[in-house]
Amino acid sequence: MDKKNALRAGAVAAGTTLMMLLMSSPALALTRDDGDDPGPGLSVAETLGLYVVAPIALFLVITGLVMVLDKSKKQV
């Protein structure tokens, strides 16, 4: 009986996955949607600044503010 249930569950999962793949639109569609107006791309320097340098700088600013504004007593 367990083998029959496992086979049924596998068939349902496979069928569901197949239907989802068939009904979904392609992720990398080449056709543009109405109102789609992409801007110019980012250069390598802009991408690194936005996704690497800016988060690190923000982390350091927040860390510095927490350290400077810390009101707890120093342990000696």
Image (cartoon, helix red, strand yellow):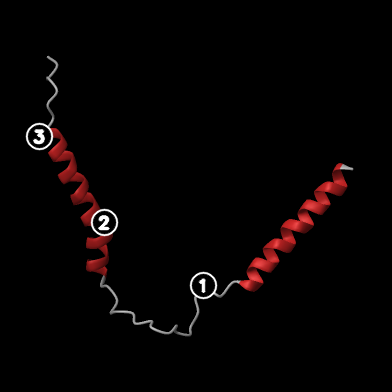
**Image location of residue 70, percent across then percent down:** 13, 30
| Residue at the front extreme of this rendering | 35
Depicted 71 relative to depicted 18: above or below: above
Lateral position of residue 36 relative to residue 75, left or right: right
User: Which class describes the residues within 10 Å of circle 2: few (<14), some (14-19), or many (20+)?
Assistant: few
Quadrant assignment, res 64 = top left
Label 2 secondary element: helix
Label 3 secondary element: helix
| Circles 3 and 2: CB atoms closer than 8 Å | no
Name the mark on residue 52.
2
Q: Earlier in the sequence, mark 3 or mark 2?
A: 2
Q: Amino acid under label 1?
A: Ala
Q: Earlier in the sequence, mark 1 or mark 3?
A: 1
Name the mark on residue 40.
none
Lateral position of residue 76 relative to residue 51, left or right: left
Name the residue that disc number 1 marks.
27
Q: Earlier in the sequence, mark 1 or mark 2?
A: 1
Name the mark on residue 68.
3
**Image location of residue 44, percent across then percent down:** 26, 69
Q: CA distance from mark 1 to mark 3?
A: 47 Å
Quadrant assignment, res 37 = bottom left
**Image location of residue 74, percent across then percent down:** 12, 20
Label 1 secondary element: loop
- Pair 3/2: label in front: 3
In this view of the protein, which residue sits in the foreground, 37 or 47?
A: 37
Where does the N terminus fall, quadrant-wise?
A: top right
Identified at 23% across, 67% down, the residue is: 46
Q: CA distance from mark 3 to mark 2?
A: 25 Å
Q: Amino acid under label 2?
A: Val
User: Which class describes the residues within 10 Å of circle 1: few (<14), some (14-19), or many (20+)?
Assistant: few
